[in-house]
Amino acid sequence: MPPISNDERLRRWRMVLGKSAECGGNRGRGGSAADGEGLPRGLDGDDLQMDHVLEALYDSDRSAGLGSSSPNVNRWLGDIRRYFSKSVVQVMQKDALERLNLHQMLLEPETLETVEANVHLVGTLLTLKNVIPNKTKETARQVVQKVVADLERRLRNPMTEAVRGAISKATRTSRPKAGEIDWHRTIKKNLHNYLPDRGTIIAERLVGYGRKQSSLRDIVLCIDQSGSMATSIVYSSIFGAVLATLRAVSTRLVVFDTEVVDLTDQLQDPVDVLFGTQLGGGTDINRAVRYCRGHITRPSQTIFVLISDLYEGGIAADLLRQTAEMVASGVNMVCLLALSDDGTPCYDEKLAAQMTALGAPSFACTPDLFPSMMATAIQKQDMHTWAAKNDVVIRTGATAEL
């Protein structure tokens, strides 16, 4: 890579610091301190247009910004997609929502049609779904459908393969009945017994899947629908829909705030699940866990995934008691503090550590790691070992007083 010239370096600093840096001001774009001496005093071409786009967002407190005009917002959304990469566009859209309070603009179908759809936008739309006007509801649903479809295409195969593989390993037997033989693995195990003259393999060792039944594992996804968990709800709904298509597992999906809503019968369509949630409100984790426990009939074959930041508005002591009882009964319980790519989440550290101490490991998980995490749970392997291999930090350090 050739070295950057001094002129190019100054141009880049001018784009970062903003127009105020030209005049020797000491405040740069976004409020950073800077010494503007020596920076270019004029821009042209694409640089000038990019500067206008950045100024509308990051210097809005000193300029007209985008105002409340829908055409201005739509034009701005188009400009940022013209001048910046997709990843940068998503960052700028998120900043615009926070800095310029553009939530109202997202209620206009013209704006929704131009916005770069992503999981954060879906979370915003879900938050606003009860106040979206009728003329915008169908457009909003189309935006959510597009994002969900894209994510499902990316996540379906890893989830399916991980669960099927884990079920196969967890239930495989070396003495299968005729209808339970896994012929693919049986042939692979006996390749050394191939007889060229007969063109056949002697199956000295049989490999099977074990006793067939309607489902080999029961999976319960219990999801906190407080506003901070919006991204987690999107990913959880998609994974729940994928799991619901696998015959080897039965899947239940429950969302909660201070009320509990069972969305299991809507799992065939993750978009319906998402529009069945109500982001915001209080949180009663204990009540939701109690509801889910009432539907657990095979504790030793159940994986219970609580997805919550653990800011309990109910009775924390009862939640800990229920957790201890579930784990003691054989339920494999995991607490995901977040299911997203957003980095370290904000959560109740003390309660998370107490949950871990009771046998319900508590940690944040990315969507890409969720399939292997579920495979580990299905095979009843040690979650701490899995976490260490994947650089996942399980919250520890406290003991639970029951």
Image (tube, grey):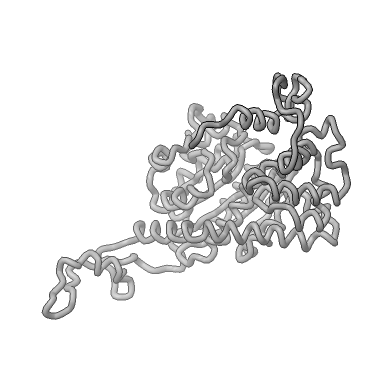
Residue at (63, 47) in percent of width and height: 85
Does residue 332 appear in the picture of this structure? yes
260 or 2, which lies in front? 2
312 or 106, which lies in front? 106
Q: How many marks?
A: 0
Residue 116 image position (x, y, % from top left): 69, 52
**Quarter the C terminus occupies:** top right
Residue at (72, 46) in percent of width and height: 80
Residue at (61, 56) in percent of width and height: 237
Does residue 96 appear in the picture of this structure? no
Q: Residue furthest bottom?
A: 198
Residue 391 image position (x, y, % from top left): 44, 37
In this rendering, would 302 be left or right of 261?
Answer: left
Residue 125 image position (x, y, % from top left): 74, 52
Position of residue 213 relative to residue 166, above or below, is below
400 or 217, which lies in front? 217
207 or 72, which lies in front? 72
- Quarter residue 203 falls in: bottom left
Q: Residue furthest left?
A: 197
Position of residue 169 relative to residue 282, above or below, is below
Residue 189 image position (x, y, % from top left): 22, 64
In this rendering, would 124 be left or right of 238?
Answer: right
- Quarter residue 165 falls in: bottom left
Residue at (67, 42) in percent of width and height: 91
